[in-house]
């Protein structure tokens, strides 16, 4: 199913052959087996891709929204026809359980569908003039060539969430996916190719992130960079992008709190807290990182949670019944271990898990882990673990819960469990986060805005807001005397 060598650089409608000395291995994180080799490009390939995207811009941006929509819609259909195969490739290179991978591919396709629909709806404005001698209108126009840089944790949906709206708006693209998960990116680009995307509109360059990033940052042609990844790299792009005042959309790290109120449905709150914490083995930007439970229900909640955590199955994502696959690499596994050791050395108790998984596979597994008796000085309470670990603290009143939940430099997602609408609204309004889930831990959908505040970034993906990121508002003032 996966070729030993995969062409992964696509410029101006052509796949480049792999070159000796410019290749890198793709490894299955569950077994540590090499699954393919891909191209490892750099500055030169990125510059050629930027030129191709620049050349294609006038053709693509001048097509009607309806025409662009047809290609996006066809891409959606092709992705949906191929969910099983695409999910298997995703799991093999990234590790998440097959059911989650299928969910990701379906979600990725939904972004293509949504923006196929939105492509025809980039409305402008007619502004009533204050003088009779003028007419005024505002027309949305595509930003231009966009550099898209994506992470490994959602290697398919992070691409379509950016490319769907950018392409619908009329922008052309240079895509740089994460080095560890290039195969999913290749598959997305092949889908666009098969759907009839004109040459040069979508270009793919895998390889040296620093060089490719520098080519994007130093080019006058690249007008916007849309990035999902770590806060540190986001800050770097913002600093360097300031030289040309580049437009930036940044989806960065998070540190999501869950608040379980005393009137919550505890069974539901425990089940969904697990989904949030352990989805993708905790490697999701909106994963729960801290759990705050009302002290009056804490014992009962902890009991329900432990029973459910202890029933989770760790293993290869390709095997049926697996709930948690491997982490992406050894560094990720070491980080979880370090967070656990730091917490335990400061007095935390291990309720479940707490060590590397000792199974039959060689990959980077870690047991689903719950800690109690945690204090705010423990690293896990402020740093993103990006692994299957959740610390639990109690609170005595709502004001304390909100204060603790907001005590973070991040502001991506927060969750509340309560059965009372007025509590839900009151707490949601006071949480300093871009996304709030009330009795809901999967708030990422094509039709609604997704994005953080504070050090979780800026800009939105999803909904009509997502497409507005890729449109400039051009004001036209017409003298009619
Ligand atoms: P990362 O190290 O920042 O990498 C993300 C992407 O940036 C990769 O394609 C990477 O390429 C590239 N990159 C790295 N250094 C670069 C540079 N100097 N110039 C240009 N590009 C560069 O992040 P990660 O570890 O892959 O992803 C995990 C982080 O992403 C977490 O913090 C998570 O919360 C965040 N995330 C946020 C969202 C959101 O929507 N807010 C969604 C998913 C993930 P290489 O792979 O070649 O290094």
Image (cartoon, helix red, strand yellow):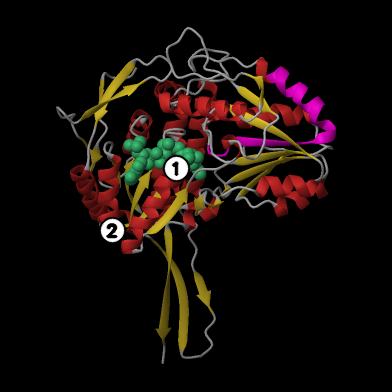
Q: Is mark 1 within 8 Å of ligand 1?
A: yes
Q: Is residue 148 left or right of residue 116?
A: left
Relative placement, left or right, of 104 versus 378 is left
* Residue 198 percent location from the top left of the image: 28, 46
Q: Residues within 10 Å of mark 2 (few under 14, many from 20)?
A: some
Label at residue 269: none
Query: Mark 1 falls on what kind of element?
Result: loop
| Distance CA(mark 2)–CA(mark 1) | 33 Å
Q: Is residue 372 left or right of residue 106?
A: right
First reached walking from the N terminus: tag 2 or tag 1: 2
Q: Which quarter of the frame holds ligand 1?
A: top left
- Within 10 Å of the Cα at label 1, are there few (<14), some (14-19), or many (20+) other Cα atoms? some
SS at circle 2: helix
Residue in view at x 70 percent, y 26 percent: 271
Q: Which quadrant is home to the C terminus?
A: bottom left
Position of the N terminus by quadrant: top left
Q: Nearer the viewer, residue 269 or 129?
A: 269
Above or below, comparing residue 2 to residue 181 in the picture: above
| Residue 237: x %, y % from top left | 37, 52
Above or below residue 176? Residue 91 is above
Q: Is residue 301 magenta?
A: yes
Q: For mark 2, what is the residue? A: 58
Q: Is residue 349 magenta?
A: no
Using the image as rendered, state which of residue 347 and residue 194 is in the foreground. 347
Residue lying furthest top: 360
Give the image location of residue 373, x and y in percent. Answer: 70, 30
Asked if the beta carbon under badge 2 is closer than 8 A to the nearest atom of ligand 1, the reply is no
Residue 67 can be seen in this image: no
Compare residues 191 and 429 and report the one nearer the observer.
Answer: 429
- The boundaries of the magenta stretch are 285-308
Q: Outermost residue toward the bottom?
A: 481
- Judging by the rendered image, the residue that carries numbered circle 1 is 230
């Amino acid at each position: 199913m996966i070729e030993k060598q995969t062409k992964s650089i696509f410029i101006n409608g052509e796949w480049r052959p792999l070159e000796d000395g410019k290749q890198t291995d793709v490894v299955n994180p569950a077994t540590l087996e090499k699954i393919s080799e891909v191209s490892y490009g750099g500055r030169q390939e990125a510059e050629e891709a930027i030129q191709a995207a620049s050349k294609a811009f006038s053709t693509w941006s001048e097509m009607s929204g309806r025409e662009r929509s047809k290609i996006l819609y066809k891409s959606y259909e092709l992705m949906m026809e191929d969910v099983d195969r695409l999910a298997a490739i995703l799991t093999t290179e990234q590790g998440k359980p097959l059911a989650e991978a299928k969910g990701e591919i379906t979600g990725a396709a939904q972004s293509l569908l949504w923006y196929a629909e939105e492509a025809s709806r980039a409305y402008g404005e007619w502004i009533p003039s204050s003088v009779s001698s003028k007419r005024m209108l505002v027309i949305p126009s595509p930003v231009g060539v966009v550099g898209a840089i994506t992470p490994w944790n959602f290697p398919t949906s992070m691409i379509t969430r950016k490319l769907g709206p950018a392409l619908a708006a009329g922008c052309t693209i240079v895509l740089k996916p994460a080095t560890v998960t290039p195969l999913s990116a290749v598959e997305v680009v092949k889908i666009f190719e098969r759907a009839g995307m004109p040459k040069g509109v979508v270009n793919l360059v895998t390889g040296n992130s620093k060089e490719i990033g520098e080519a994007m940052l130093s080019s006058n042609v690249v007008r916007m960079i849309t990035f999902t990844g770590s806060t540190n790299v986001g800050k770097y792009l913002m600093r360097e992008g300031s030289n040309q005042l580049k437009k930036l959309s940044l989806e960065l790290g998070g540190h999501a709190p869950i608040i379980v109120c005393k009137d919550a449905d505890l069974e539901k709150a425990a089940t969904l807290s697990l989904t949030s914490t352990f989805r993708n083995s905790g490697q999701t930007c909106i994963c729960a990182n801290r759990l705050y439970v009302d002290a009056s229900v804490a014992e009962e909640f902890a009991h329900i949670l432990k029973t459910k955590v202890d029933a989770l199955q760790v293993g290869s994502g390709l095997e049926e019944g697996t709930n948690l696959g491997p982490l992406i690499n050894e560094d990720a596994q070491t980080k979880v271990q370090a967070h656990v050791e730091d917490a335990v050395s400061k007095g935390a108790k291990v309720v479940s898990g707490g060590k590397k998984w000792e199974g039959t596979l060689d990959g980077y597994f870690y047991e689903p882990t719950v800690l109690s008796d945690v204090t705010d000085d423990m690293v896990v309470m402020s740093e993103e673990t990006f692994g299957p670990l959740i610390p639990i603290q109690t609170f005595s009143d709502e004001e304390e819960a909100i204060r603790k939940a907001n005590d973070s430099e991040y502001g991506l997602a927060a969750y509340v469990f309560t059965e009372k609408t007025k509590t839900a609204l009151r707490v949601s309004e006071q949480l300093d986060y871009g996304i709030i889930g009330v009795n809901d831990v999967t708030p990422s959908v094509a039709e609604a805005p997704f994005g953080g505040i504070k050090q979780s970034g800026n800009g939105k993906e999803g909904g009509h807001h997502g497409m507005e990121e890729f449109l400039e508002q051009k004001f036209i003032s017409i003298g009619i005397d």
